[in-house]
Amino acid sequence: METQVLIVGAGPVGLTLALDLGRRGVRCTLIERNATAIQLPKMERCNARTMEIYRRLGISERVRDAGLPRNAPMDVFLALSIADSPLAHLPCPSVAEATAEIAARNDGGLLEPYQLISQYTLEPLLRSIVETLPSVNVRFGCELIAFNQDANSVTAVLQAQDAAEETIRASYLVGCDGGSSTVRKQLGIQLQGEGNIRKLRQALFRCDDLYERIPMGKGRHYHIAEGPLFPFLILQDSTRHWTLHAAASSDGEMADIFKKSLAMPIAFEMLSVNEWTQHLLCAEKYGEGRVFLAGDAAHLVIPTGGLGMNTGVGDAVDLSWKLAATMAGWGGQQLLASYEAERRPIGLRNVKASRAAMTGRMGWRAAHSPNVRDNTPEGAATRARMAALFDLEQRKVTEISGIEAGYRYVNSPIVWPQEGEGPDPDNPSYIPTTWPGARLPHVWLSDGVALHDRLGPGYSLLRLGGTQANTSSLERAFGEIGAPLEVLEIAAERAREIYQYDMLLVRPDLHVVWRGNQAPQDAEKVALAATGRALTRN
């Protein structure tokens, strides 16, 4: 049996990788050792950048239709219980409100808002879409046993349930198989950072009436200010299911914690309990030879900030077009090598951001005192102190659009260098920029269409502000390489104002390669660098 890409692990990252590769006509085999999709809500939110990616893949509205209703509030609360008045309340716009705000502005901001959708909802949806692609073979109940590689291919041994071992030959293998990755372990790649920080339990509850009855109002996150456990309740997309995170001593204790956190008579059912461990780790390498790592196989973060699965989706779309280009023959040796050069710094950066969010959460929790419920000046002071710290520190979790979408591939071998340091790539606030390596800012065109939606699956050369520059040499250079390049004349003045340059060269994943007001004198070198065919960028 043969395939072009063998993808191990059918979580959101593996499924997104298969979806993008399948849309590009790459023959893939996607295997998952579990017989069915996950039944636990390990993640519950696609951030703005992930939703932009899903828009580009043509599925963003299907994701929204399956997730939390668009008009549902996304607020975050701190309270002594669900039945009490909040100590702190951070309003967050619903998807409908955020979408309307995006439509009314044209300042280079984000194109899509976030979407609350539980992992047990997202995975079956992605699977149903991937299974329609003729070039993708999806196999659940099939496990990777071992693999070896040579200069030309990877040979893997698979074990399907109730079947004999079989061998499959692939051009490339990608391990999207989670934190205990078989692929990573067989490569001998180590995780670096802080492991085994803390053990928690996550319980899934069904409570049909709770969402409509919460006195303090509807939201998505409810932090309970009761130490030392500090229960954390998370709304799931059905509005009937909730997860609880707490450092309980036993599975059975989780039901008692949930009941105490509700503090009002209401029927509920505990559906499952699982123990999990907090890690802040990043792989020392993102692959070796023809084998790559993506998602939790490459980086493990604490869910605070929602940077786990969303970082993995970024891995998938960085790697997918590079694999497709290499197999199509126009991608050079540096193209796949650039995957680690680009994504590992982002993995390290997001581990750092997750650590900051966790530290902030521990900060407001440290202000807790046993007198927090007392009707005394001292009790009031404790509550006020916790609320003030929560209002400050929780924003490191909910207001990090720069971390989510403002990342820039600094020192990438396939991005044309520009003199200067460039904008801060670690800014938690999103600041639109076309500095090479950055994601192309969103702009509405005069006909109401998003510029992102005008860009095809290959490279795009944007000619802005009515420029008369002759870009034929750059176009010819791409043509000689055989790389797909579409030239777009963008007349909208607002696009030129936001992008600040007359010309931009944009990659298939919508990151800027080069910008200028005159056609590059070394057009051939720019094209060679962009397609990974140059040993250096200078």
Image (cartoon, rainbow, N blue to C red):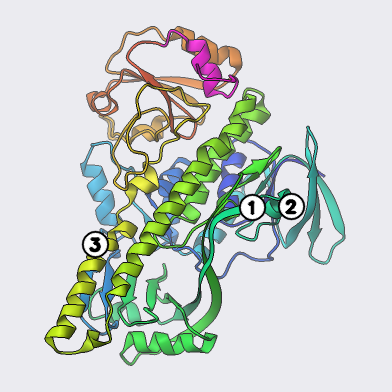
**Circles 2, 3 touching at the beta carbon (< 8 Å):** no
Decide which of tag 2 and tag 3 comes sooner along the chain: 2
- Residue at 35% of width from left, 8% of height from top? 469
Q: Which residue is mark 1?
A: 190
**Circles 2, 1 touching at the beta carbon (< 8 Å):** no
Outermost residue, bottom side: 265
Residue 37 lies in magenta, yes or no? no
> Do we see residue 90 in this rendering?
no
Between 419 and 207, the one nearer to me in the picture: 419
Mark 2 to mark 1 CA distance (whole Å): 10 Å
- Residue at 33% of width from left, 51% of height from top? 400
**Circles 3, 1 touching at the beta carbon (< 8 Å):** no
Mark 2 to mark 3 CA distance (whole Å): 43 Å
The part of the image, by quadrant, that contains residue 71 is bottom left
Q: Name the secondary structure under disc 1.
A: loop
Amino acid type, residue under disc 3 in the picture: Leu
Number of the front mark, 3 or 1: 1
Amino acid type, residue under disc 2 in the picture: Gln
Q: Which residue is mark 2?
A: 186
How many C-alpha atoms fall within 10 Å of the one at disc 1: few (<14), some, or many (≥20)?
Answer: some
Q: Which residues are magenta?
A: 520-538
Outermost residue, left side: 377
Q: Name the secondary structure under disc 2.
A: helix
Vertical position of residue 299 compared to residue 444: above or below: below
Residue 138: x, y in percent?
68, 53
The part of the image, by quadrant, that contains residue 288 is top right
Q: Which residue is mark 3?
A: 392
